[in-house]
Amino acid sequence: MSLVAETTFGVESPAYVAIRWAQSVGVSLLVGTAIVRWLILPRAKRALAQRSRESAAAGVEIPAIPDDDLMRRVERLAAPLALALFVVEVARLAAQYHAVAGGDAFEVAILRALVFSSHWGGAWIATLLGAALILAATRLRVRDARWVEAVFWSALVVTAAGVASGGHAATGGWQAEALQTLHVLAAGAWIGSLAVVVLVVIPPLARLGTATAHATVAAVIAAFSPVALVAGALLLATGVSAAARALGSFDALWLSTYGRTLIVKLALLGVTAGTGAYNWRRVLPTLGTAAGSTARLRRSSAVELVAALAILVVTAVLVATPLPAELSGAVHP
């Protein structure tokens, strides 16, 4: 049975691009939720506790450290995000079926072949399973919270692997899929964590406007910065590797549709990285001293987030753009 159909709704259509973009946003936010909850906020809390002890030893009284409300706010993101990703995956299956079968009457045989007899179907199942496991992790009620964390992180890896193997990496074997999985996780660690910090963690602190609140913002950003640096480096390394394999030759960077689209992505990445560097070098040292510094951080981070969302749009386009290396026969598994 052929899984190719002539249809105006294809994998490169705007509707399908929007679905893939929603998938990327959902996965990135889920990774960001995990990073912020189990890495950034605990590090920030330890830094604030150390500062409190040092101040007390010096005979200086500072306001009490905030409780775990921030962690609970972040935790509450996981369930709706996982549910939204589950819905997106159902929509993606419908879109893929329509792209494959066209506008003909629904056939169970085609759907079964698509899901169970194709590499795309295996990747889709992995992503859907990951979303379901994340949703289950949010409902776990056990004494040892490490079980919840372990299930959550395992589900995230499964989800990222599903997303990675559903794209061009599928033609490169398990090595290419593993690198792309790291790429997806790194993107979430940077972009997703930034979004969670800016949209969920900072607003309630900014509304408080107290010295402790601004000190907490400073501690959170200080804890986020090394995560962003490591994730950015990993994102660049895996991205360069994938681009080299996809392009096949340096000329394809400007001679092919894929290459020119990749240039747009690189330009947006430059905006994101430049804004992040500005926050790190100029804004971070001033945090914790005045409300104006927190407002300045929110403005510059908004630019970084908009550029990051645009990167995910371009990535959703690239996933369905033919590889110049494949067209020239230069791809090697």
Image (spheres, helix red, strand yellow):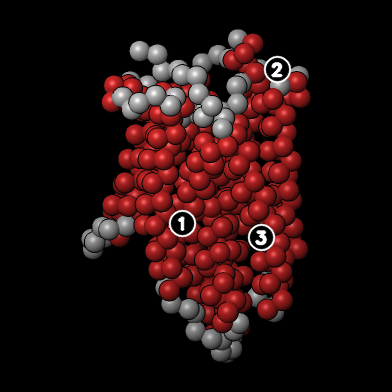
Residue linked to disc 2 = 249
Asked if marks 1 and 2 touch (Cβ < 8 Å), the reply is no
Nearer-N-terminus badge (1/2): 1
Sequence-first tag of 3 and 2: 2
Whether residue 206 is situated above or below residue 240 in the rendered picture: below
Q: Earlier in the sequence, mark 1 or mark 3?
A: 1
Estimate the spatial distance between the alpha carbons at disc 1 and disc 3, rounded to whole Å.
Answer: 18 Å
Q: Residue at image x 66%, y 72%?
A: 294
Could you tell me residue 298's position as x and y percent? 66, 66
Q: Quadrant of residue 92?
A: top left
Image quadrant where one finds the N terminus: top left
| Left or right: 150, with 323 as reference point | left
Crowdedness near tag 1: few (<14), some (14–19) or many (≥20) residues, C-alpha within 10 Å: many
What percent of the width, then of the height, locates residue 249?
Answer: 70, 17
Residue type (three-letter) at the residue carrying disc 3:
Ala
Q: Say whether residue 238 is visible.
A: no
Q: Secondary structure at mark 2?
A: loop
Amino acid carrying mark 2 in the image: Ser
Instruction: Give left or right: position of 98 versus 151.
Output: right
Where's residue 111, x and y in %?
33, 26
> Measured from the top left, where is residue 182 in percent x and y?
51, 37
Residue 141 appears left or right of 222? left
Name the kind of residue labelled 1 in the image: Thr
* Residue under pointer 1: 33
Q: SS of the residue at dot 3?
A: helix
Q: Which residue is pictured at 73% across the width and 33% down the height?
A: 263
Asked whether residue 140 is in view, the answer is yes
